[in-house]
Image (spheres, rainbow, N blue to C red):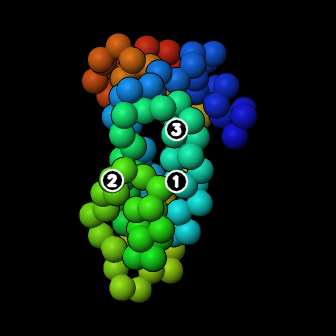
Amino acid sequence: MERREQAYRRDAPPALRDRTIILVDDGLATGASMRAAVLAARQQQPAHIVAAAPVAARDTLEQLRQEADAVVCVHAPEEFASVGEWYEDFEQTTDGEVRELLDQGAVGKPPGSSLNNYS
């Protein structure tokens, strides 16, 4: 996690104080990663924390509602075995892809207009 934090932030501290923060995950099985993200964000004193995912286990959503200010989920099926079962393609995103998207978002560039060539 420390390696990824350094790679993604590039020494820029998070500016979360007094902002509405939306934390997004590809899906919530146990919700451990999202709960850790909510707790870490909470230390930066944001105005509100929204946890969002397209799919999640119902009991995980109930637990998360106790920690985040709001929880948004498109689908909470009765039977939930894993996040990957709800995707046709569940390949991991590379560090290079994440950095490229962060760069694009930082300067308002649309996806596909690369600022850097990460490999």
- Count neighbours of disc 3 (C-alpha within 10 A) and say few if under 14, some if 14 to 19, many if 20 or more: many
Q: Is residue 87 visible?
A: no
- 2 or 1: tag closer to the N-terminus: 1
Viewer-side residue, 97 vs 29: 29
Which mark is drawn over residue 74?
none
Element class at badge 2: strand
Residue type at mark 1: give it: Met
When the figure is inspected, residue 58 is found, relative to residue 107, above or below; the finding is: below
In the drawing, what numbered circle is on residue 70?
Answer: 2
Q: Secondary structure at mark 1?
A: helix
Residue 97: % across, % down:
50, 33
- Find residue 41 and name its label: 3
| Corner quadrant of residue 27 | bottom left
User: If the image is split into quadrants, where does the C terminus sit?
Assistant: top right
Instruction: Give the CA distance from mark 2 to mark 3.
Output: 14 Å
Q: Residues within 10 Å of mark 1 (few under 14, many from 20)?
A: many
Q: Is residue 115 above or below residue 9?
A: above
Q: Is residue 16 something one can see in this rendering?
A: yes
Residue named by callout 1: 34
Furthest toward the bottom, the residue is 79
Q: Residues within 10 Å of mark 2 (few under 14, many from 20)?
A: some
Residue drawn at 28 percent across, 24 percent down: 110
